[in-house]
Amino acid sequence: MITYTDRKNFDPAALLPIFEQSPWALGRTVAETARMVLSTDLLITAWDDGRLIGCGRVLTDYVYRASIWDVVVDSAYQGQDIGTEIIHQILNHSSLQRVELFWLCTRDKQAFYETLGFSAKEQTGMVWDRRKQRESPGYDERA
Ligand SMILES: CC(C)(COP(=O)(O)OP(=O)(O)OC[C@H]1O[C@@H](n2cnc3c(N)ncnc32)[C@H](O)[C@@H]1OP(=O)(O)O)[C@@H](O)C(=O)NCCC(=O)NCCS
């Protein structure tokens, strides 16, 4: 049976196998992932017994805005409504009931999010990518 939790008392290294399946999260380290978990306002994980098979996380002010990041389901478990349940757990979480607007960024999963009520019509995002900036002439790396 697949179970879901908002608790963070697990070894952060358990996230790395699913991050390795996500182009934007390749190469994340245990140390950085541990810090990420600690600093994340809400982390939902899905488990099959002791195996972490899905996640989704939220950064928020708990009132006006919440952004959703790193929604991933292990490829062996996709298509079983686990991604849907992770998003439902986020949107329905007791700590986020006052949040006015949830935002996320996706390259090619618009169809998945539209089934959950998200709209691409409202706004478009812009990003400042430190790794890409480092390759630009004139990038000023401050200590
Ligand atoms: C996107 C992702 C999280 C969806 O999780 P999932 O558990 O496979 O999705 P679900 O089983 O809950 O699917 C829910 C619905 O979305 C649809 N859907 C799922 N993945 C989809 C995709 N890649 N493209 C289009 N529709 C998709 C399903 O067909 C389903 O619709 P239905 O109920 O009408 O059949 C998962 O495919 C994944 O981890 N992909 C790789 C990482 C990624 O790209 N994450 C998104 C970052 S923004």
Image: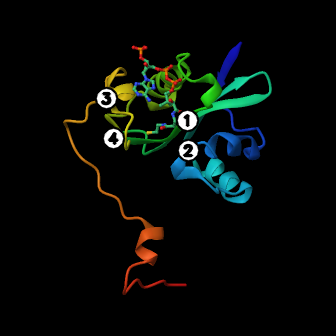
Position of the N terminus, as image quadrant, is: top right
Disc 3 marks which amino acid?
Phe
Is 7 placed left or right of 23 in the picture? right
Position of the C terminus, as image quadrant, is: bottom right
Residue 44 in picture, x, y percent from top left: 59, 32
Query: Which label number is shown at residue 118?
Result: 3
Disc 1 marks which amino acid?
Val
* C-alpha distance separating marks 2 and 4: 29 Å
Residue 5 seen by the camera: no
Q: Residues within 10 Å of mark 3 (few under 14, many from 20)?
A: some
Query: Which label number is shown at residue 64?
Result: 4
Position above or below: 76 against 39? above
Q: Does the closest atom of ligand 1 sit within 8 Å of the Cβ of label 1?
A: yes
Which residue ends up furthest to the left in the rendered image? 121
Task: Identify the element where label 4 is drawn.
Answer: loop
Find disc 2 in the rendering and name its residue.
Answer: 22
Residue 119 in picture, x, y percent from top left: 26, 31
Q: Nearer the viewer, residue 65 or 47?
A: 47
* C-alpha distance separating marks 1 and 4: 25 Å
* C-alpha distance separating marks 4 and 3: 17 Å
* C-alpha distance separating marks 2 and 3: 21 Å
Position above or below: 102 against 81? below
Q: Residue at x 42, y 45 (%)?
A: 61
Task: Identify the element where label 2 is drawn.
Answer: loop
Task: Identify the element where label 1 is drawn.
Answer: strand
Which residue ends up furthest to the top in the rendered image? 1
Residue 94 in picture, x, y percent from top left: 50, 25
Query: Which label number is shown at residue 72?
Result: 1
**Reading the chain from its start, which is encountered first: label 1 or label 4?**
4
Task: Look at the numbered discs 2 and 1 and tell me whether their residues touch, using CB distance below 8 Å.
Answer: yes
